[in-house]
């Protein structure tokens, strides 16, 4: 399934994927970016590797669904939404059906039916 972004932007795709309008992620994902759960040395290394000066910048950048412009677009964030971000390049995104999505149709077939969604800004 291919989408031209002139008709549907990343925000719209994210809404199809089940994301809301807030930044959020699973606790087991976020703990690696918080000083209450991660040793100081490791957190400092992660902060510098991702180009930030402070741990809270790293935390906020990883505390997000992939469609918010001020949040990091990270394909590895665990999700229970219908689609998960696989690849994010400037002007292009690739979403795949989440194999762990919990909804099924009336016959018991796992949703969504579409395997991949590709959007392009061109």
Image: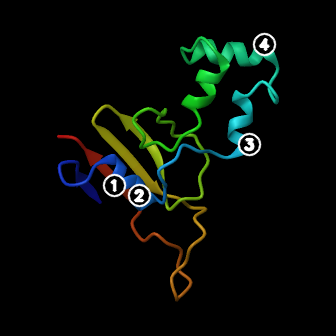
Mark 3 or mark 4, earlier in chain = 3
**Within-10-Å neighbours for mark 2: few <14, some 14–19, many 20+:** some
Check disc 4 and report the residue beneath it: 41
Mark 2 against mark 4, which lies toward the viewer? 2
Residue at the farthest bottom position? 107
- Left or right of residue 91: residue 6: left
Residue matched to label 3? 28
Point out residue 105 in the picture as x, y percentages from the top left corner: 51, 82
Q: Distance between the residues labelled 2 and 4?
A: 37 Å
Report which residue position mark 1 lands on: 12
* Of labels 1 and 4, the one closer to you: 1
Image quarter (top left, top right, bottom left or bottom right) of the C terminus: top left
The N terminus is located in which quarter? bottom left
**Looking at the image, which residue is at 39% across and 35% down?**
69
Q: Image quadrant of residue 68?
A: top left
**Image marks 3 and 4: residues in contact by CB distance under 8 Å:** no
- Give the residue at mark 2: 15
**Are the two marked residues, 1 and 2, in contact with CB atoms closer than 8 angstroms?**
yes
Q: In this view, does 59 lie above or below 100?
A: above
Q: Which of 45 and 2 is in front in this view?
A: 45
> Which residue is depicted at the point 44% across and 32% down?
70
Task: Name the colouring of the figure.
Answer: rainbow
How would you rate the neighbour count of disc 4 (Cα within 10 Å): few for under 14, some for 14-19, many for 20 or more? few
Nearer to us of marks 1 and 3 is 1
Spatial CA span between label 1 and label 2: 5 Å
Q: Nearer the viewer, residue 43 or 21?
A: 21
Tell whether label 3 touches label 2 (CB within 8 Å): no
Separation of marks 3 and 4 at Cα, in angstroms: 19 Å
Number of numbered labels in the structure image:
4
Q: Residue at x 38, y 57 (%)?
A: 116
Q: What element carries label 3?
A: helix
Which x, y percent locates residue 39?
Answer: 82, 20
């Amino acid at each position: 399934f291919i989408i031209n972004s002139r008709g549907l932007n990343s925000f719209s795709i994210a809404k199809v994927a089940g994301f809301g309008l807030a930044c959020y992620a699973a606790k087991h994902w976020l703990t690696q970016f918080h000083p209450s759960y991660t040793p100081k040395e490791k957190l400092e290394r992660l902060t510098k590797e991702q180009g930030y000066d402070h741990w809270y910048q790293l935390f906020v950048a990883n505390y997000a669904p992939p469609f918010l412009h001020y949040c990091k677009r990270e394909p590895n964030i665990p999700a229970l939404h219908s689609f998960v971000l696989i690849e994010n390049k400037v002007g292009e995104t690739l979403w795949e059906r989440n194999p762990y999505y919990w909804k099924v149709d009336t016959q018991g077939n796992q949703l969504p039916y579409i395997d991949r969604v590709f959007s392009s800004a061109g």
